[in-house]
Amino acid sequence: MATQLKCTQCGEWGEDLDRCPSCAALRQVHSTFANQENPNRHKAFEMPTMEWNTDPQISAWKRSLINTGKAMHWMVLAVGGAIAWMAYWVAV
Ligand SMILES: [Zn+2]
């Protein structure tokens, strides 16, 4: 059975998921988890990984500054993670 959707513009019911068959108004997508045609949203959750900035529009010295910051950020996260991990084993 097809889902019937009510148009917010004209109040007519229809089966088309993208637009209203009566007045052709586009339907609004409300779901947070709906994949909105964005390839970055295909996975609900993905572990972040270290990625160097390779944007050619940013000049080389600025990029090295950004990448140094990224490396330091991950070091801070690694130290923080190590302390949290040790605290867990002390508490247990
Ligand atoms: Zn309509």
Image (spheres, rainbow, N blue to C red):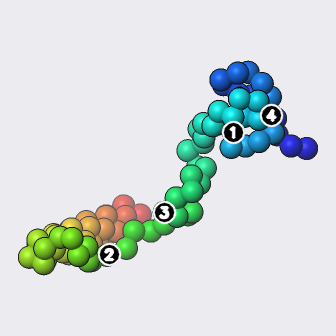
Residue occupied by mark 3:
40
Q: Quadrant of residue 48?
A: bottom left
Q: Does residue 16 appear left or right of residue 38 in this picture?
A: right
Rounded to the nearest angstrom, the CA distance separating label 4 from label 1 is 9 Å
Residue at the location (37% across, 64% down)? 88
Residue occupied by mark 1:
19
* Among the two numbered marks 2 and 4 on one chain, the one whose residue lies closer to the N terminus: 4
Do the residues bearing badges 2 and 1 touch, measured as CB atoms within 8 Å? no
Q: In front of the other: label 3 or label 1? A: 1
Q: Does residue 53 appear left or right of residue 21 in this picture?
A: left
Amino acid carrying label 3: it is: Asn
Q: In front of the other: label 3 or label 4? A: 4
Residue occupied by mark 4:
14
Question: For the residue with label 4, is its CB less than 8 Å from the closest atom of ligand 1?
Answer: yes
Number of other residues with Cα within 10 Å of mark 2, as a class: few under 14, some 14 to 19, many 20 or more: few
Q: 61 above or below 8?
A: below
Circle 2 sits in a helix, a strand or a loop, which is it?
Answer: loop
Amino acid carrying label 4: it is: Gly
Q: Quick one: which residue is furthest to the left in this view?
A: 61
Number of other residues with Cα within 10 Å of mark 3, as a class: few under 14, some 14 to 19, many 20 or more: few
Rounded to the nearest angstrom, the CA distance separating label 2 from label 4 is 46 Å
Residue at the location (65% across, 33% down)? 25
Do the residues bearing badges 3 and 4 touch, measured as CB atoms within 8 Å? no
Amino acid carrying label 2: it is: Met
* Among the two numbered marks 2 and 1 on one chain, the one whose residue lies closer to the N terminus: 1
Do the residues bearing badges 3 and 2 touch, measured as CB atoms within 8 Å? no
Rounded to the nearest angstrom, the CA distance separating label 2 from label 1 is 41 Å
